[in-house]
């Protein structure tokens, strides 16, 4: 049997990795810690294990992994969430005694996880990025707002901590009073934040630059354009399309070189309408939510990483397929129903990604378990109660031009 891959976390990010490896017959095991997980239901997962939550107790989480060390000696460990990445990277030396850990060293991972450090890296290395300031007290935040101007973003230094506390990635504030409120609530929750200017432009101006690197040298790269976010403008992507974007290549490569990065990374950038340059928004030192899109476009980053780390096969450049859409259909439907007019979407514009070659974040006719699990979870939480059409879609998917 081939060397197994152990995927950490059971959300959408994990599912893209699981399918990218499982379809290539790599034995996949899942380590999960959330009641809302659904990746464990994938037909590609041979077995799943419940662990302690790394955000609540990193050492206990790492201990749960080490407990399985003798069984999975030499297996590839793949963190797919920020909290799993933080734990695996911080305790990488211990985990390396049993596994091949698929993440960078802590100093590099921290520079990606901590947005304040990312902003400092951009400033020190001359990388194009939005102006950011890190206040240490409320009066500093107010003073900083004067130079940045309103509206601006109150952005967490560590997104996963802020999201766990408030259920959102960041907050836009329009005036001093709102800034004071949001800064105070972040302080009360013990979450460090920075203030950042808003780059003008639409969701279509946001792009993903994915790469696999060795010591800062980019070996494989892939780009895609974000089309719709949840929520619009400052949320997570819910629809993307693969598109080779030459203007994003140089800033992406420069960022990886500045970090001396090894492994897979995803960079989110936005084109600034004021100067036409792509500005660095964030760096994810782990597989991102839409990782399945690159897989379906012929750039299977999970398998590239597996072959390199486990088999020693150094990858070379690959040509991506353009014009393939990635849709998080459940999320896209929910937000489009609520804000169809606000986003200026016509019905035809909304349907385009589903009428053209596409892949879904969760729904896969050959791997229905995760979609059933996600719908069941949403119904249980009341989000989709009474939606017979969505429930039926879990067991009776319609015809569409899906890409496999």
Image (cartoon, grey):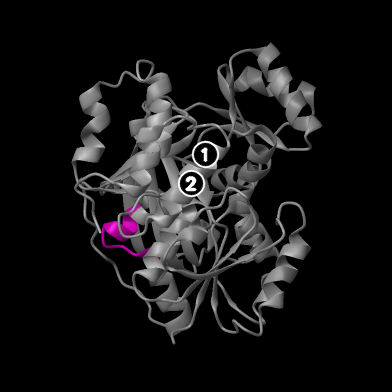
298 or 42, nearer to the observer: 42
47 or 31, nearer to the observer: 47
**Which residue matches tag 2?**
374
Measured in 3D between alpha carbons, the distance from the residue under mark 1 to the one under mark 2, in whole angstroms, is 6 Å
**Where 345 sits versus 55, above or below?**
above
Looking at the image, can residue 127 be seen?
Answer: no
Q: Is residue 297 magenta?
A: yes
Q: Position of residue 390 (x, y in %)?
A: 38, 37
Looking at the rendered image, the quarter that the C terminus falls into is: bottom left
Q: Quadrant of residue 21?
A: bottom left
The residue drawn where x is 47% and y is 81% is 310
20 or 88, nearer to the observer: 20
Magenta segment = 293-301
The residue drawn where x is 49% and y is 69% is 215
**Which residue matches tag 1?**
378
**Where 276 sits versus 5, above or below?**
above
Q: Kindly check if marks 1 and 2 are in contact, taking CB atoms under 8 A apart as contact.
A: yes
Task: Identify the secondary structure beneath mark 1.
Answer: helix
Q: Is residue 269 magenta?
A: no
**Where 241 sits versus 175, above or below?**
below
Task: Identify the secondary structure beneath mark 2.
Answer: helix
137 or 361, nearer to the observer: 361
Q: Position of residue 122 (x, y in %)?
A: 54, 45
């Amino acid at each position: 049997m081939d060397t197994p891959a152990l995927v950490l976390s059971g959300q959408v990010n994990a599912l893209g990795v699981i399918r990218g490896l499982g379809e290539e017959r790599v034995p996949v095991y899942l380590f999960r810690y959330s009641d809302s997980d659904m990746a464990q239901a994938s037909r590609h997962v041979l077995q799943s294990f419940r662990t302690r939550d790394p955000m609540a107790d990193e050492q206990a989480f790492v201990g749960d992994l080490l407990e399985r060390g003798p069984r999975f000696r030499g297996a590839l460990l793949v963190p797919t969430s920020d909290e799993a990445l933080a734990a695996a990277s911080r305790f990488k030396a211990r985990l390396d005694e049993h596994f091949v850990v698929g993440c960078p060293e802590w100093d590099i991972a921290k520079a990606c996880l901590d947005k304040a450090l990312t902003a400092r890296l951009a400033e020190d290395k001359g990388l194009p990025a939005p102006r950011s300031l890190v206040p240490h007290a409320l009066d500093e935040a107010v003073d900083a707002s004067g130079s940045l101007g309103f509206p601006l973003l109150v952005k967490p230094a560590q997104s996963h901590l802020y999201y766990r506390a408030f259920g959102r990635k960041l907050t836009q504030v329009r005036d001093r009073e709102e800034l004071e409120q949001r800064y105070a609530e972040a302080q009360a929750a013990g979450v460090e934040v920075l203030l950042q200017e808003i780059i003008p432009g639409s969701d279509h101006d946001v792009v993903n630059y994915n790469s696999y690197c060795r010591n800062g040298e980019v070996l494989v790269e892939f780009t895609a354009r974000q089309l719709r976010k949840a929520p619009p403008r400052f949320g997570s992507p819910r629809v993307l399309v693969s598109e080779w974007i030459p203007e994003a290549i140089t800033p992406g490569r420069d960022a990886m070189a500045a970090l001396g990065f090894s492994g897979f990374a995803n960079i989110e950038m936005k084109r600034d309408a004021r100067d036409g340059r792509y500005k660095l928004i964030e760096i994810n030192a782990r597989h991102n939510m839409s990782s399945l899109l690159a897989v379906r476009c012929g750039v299977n980053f999970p398998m590239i990483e597996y072959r390199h780390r486990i088999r020693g096969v150094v990858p070379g450049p690959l040509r991506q397929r353009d014009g393939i859409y990635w849709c998080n259909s459940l999320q896209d439907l929910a937000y489009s129903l609520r804000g169809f007019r606000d986003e200026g979407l016509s019905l035809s514009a909304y349907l385009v990604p589903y009428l053209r070659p596409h892949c879904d974040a969760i729904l896969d006719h050959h791997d229905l378990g995760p979609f059933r699990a996600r719908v069941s979870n949403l119904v249980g939480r009341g989000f989709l109660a009474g939606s017979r059409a969505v429930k039926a879609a879990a067991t009776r998917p319609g015809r569409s031009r899906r890409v496999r």
